[in-house]
Image (spheres, rainbow, N blue to C red):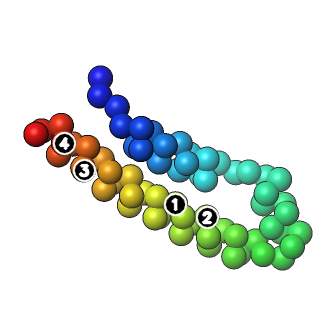
Amino acid sequence: MNSNARIDALQLMLTDLRMRNEPIRHKAAFRGCQPEFQALVTKLIEQLEAELSDEKQRFRAAQRD
């Protein structure tokens, strides 16, 4: 089976961002920046999803060659 370390790393990072990390979220709430924190998490997830999609396409194209 062929593997791509970058795809694996992106998938792991997305999994980590999607998990509810309560201690961090409590800190954000305590500091009064919960909406800003969540907006950043959402933006990061969107960027990483786009990067993951691009990387998968490059990987598939390389497999065909």
Q: Disc 3, disc 1: CB below 8 Å?
A: no
| Residue, disc 1 | 45
**Alpha carbon of mark 2 to alpha carbon of mark 1: how far?**
6 Å
Q: Which mark is residue 57?
A: 3
Q: Disc 2, disc 1: CB below 8 Å?
A: yes
| Residue, disc 2 | 41
Res 26 → quadrant: bottom right
Label 2 SS: helix
- Which residue sits at x=47%, y=48%? 10
Determine whether 35 is above or below 45 in the image.
below
Label 4 SS: helix
For the residue marked with disc 3, what is the amino acid?
Answer: Gln
For the residue marked with disc 1, what is the amino acid?
Answer: Ile
**Alpha carbon of mark 3 to alpha carbon of mark 1: how far?**
18 Å
Would you say 19 lies left or right of 11 here?
A: right
**Alpha carbon of mark 3 to alpha carbon of mark 4: how far?**
9 Å
Label 1 SS: helix
- Which residue sits at x=85%, y=63%? 27
Q: Residues within 10 Å of mark 4 (few under 14, many from 20)?
A: few
Sequence-first disc among 4 and 2: 2
Q: Position of residue 12 (x, y in %)?
A: 53, 42
